[in-house]
Amino acid sequence: MSWTRVHFWGIVATWAGAMALQSCETPPSSSQTQAKLIVADGAPQQAVPVPDLEVSPELDPLKVTVDNVGLVSFMGQDSLDVVLEDLYTYFHFSNIGEWDAMFEHFPGHRTADTAMLTVQKEMMDKWFHNGLRNRAGGCHIRYVSPWMDEGDQKVALLGLDLLYYLDFFENFEGNPEGMRLTLQDQYGKEAVEYVEFDQIEDGDTTHIRQFEVNAESSMYVLSSNDSLHCMFLPPQISKSPQLAAEMMKQETMLDLLRHKRNHFDKN
């Protein structure tokens, strides 16, 4: 899979190439979100109104939560709090299309291909404004590895339950079905569901097409040793070996996966 087809937290972002126990930041309440938006009669039972986050970014319903009962963590609480806050920020800026702010949480400084980053931003922005939205609904943290020191940086691995949406607004020109196999290959067939529904905002009806993903996933966390500013990479980074090698040592990646397998996956 080429890098231009990989969204930085694990989902294809460029169509052209193709949960709550403790919140680390308080999202808008459902009553706030639904004050202007309602699902029309006849919609699937699981359908939830989709705010246009380009117009109303404050309505982002994103939640980052922690399994306080069953959490398996090998990281200090102070560090974990920063990781969760930065993870929320990263997802939120991606959800609302603030790419420059989002890229502050991507380790772009570790790749010499800055032109690739510019192209990625342009393509993400293009499809965002043309009705295709990659949107994190929430992630529930269940495993946190210890930090592994690489000299100039430290790396950790999160195990999480991911709630993710691919929203197609009415101005999207194309067939969403083209994404089904990609999503199923990435997350598993049972984790992906497709729905269509109408929603009403201030008396106006719009039609939403949507893939919803509920899946177990993971994410690498990278930070400078000088200060704790967290940057994130999806597990699919391993499918781009050259880029992965720029981001972290292969032995670090393998050690983190082994630690997760031994201390969490087998439980």
Image (tube, rainbow, N blue to C red):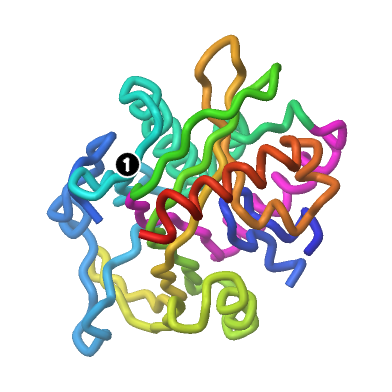
> Image quadrant of residue 209?
bottom left
Q: Going 76% across and 29% down the picture, which residue do you hit?
A: 110
Q: x and y percent of residue 206 in the render? A: 37, 75
Q: x and y percent of residue 70 in the render? A: 24, 50
Mark yes or no: residue 130 visible. yes
Q: Going 37% across and 31% down the picture, which residue do you hit?
A: 85
Residue tagged by mark 1? 58
> Image quadrant of residue 161?
bottom left
Vertical arrangement, residue 207 with respect to residue 214, above or below? below
Tell me the magenta residue range.
Answer: 111-140
Three-letter amino acid code of the residue under disc 1:
Glu
Question: Is 134 inside the magenta-drawn segment?
Answer: yes
Residue reaching furthest bottom? Answer: 42
Front residue (pair 126, 94): 94
Instruction: Indicate left or right for 99 with 143 as reference.
Output: right
Front residue (pair 34, 100): 100
Local secondary structure at mark 1: helix
- Position of the N terminus, as image quadrant, is bottom right
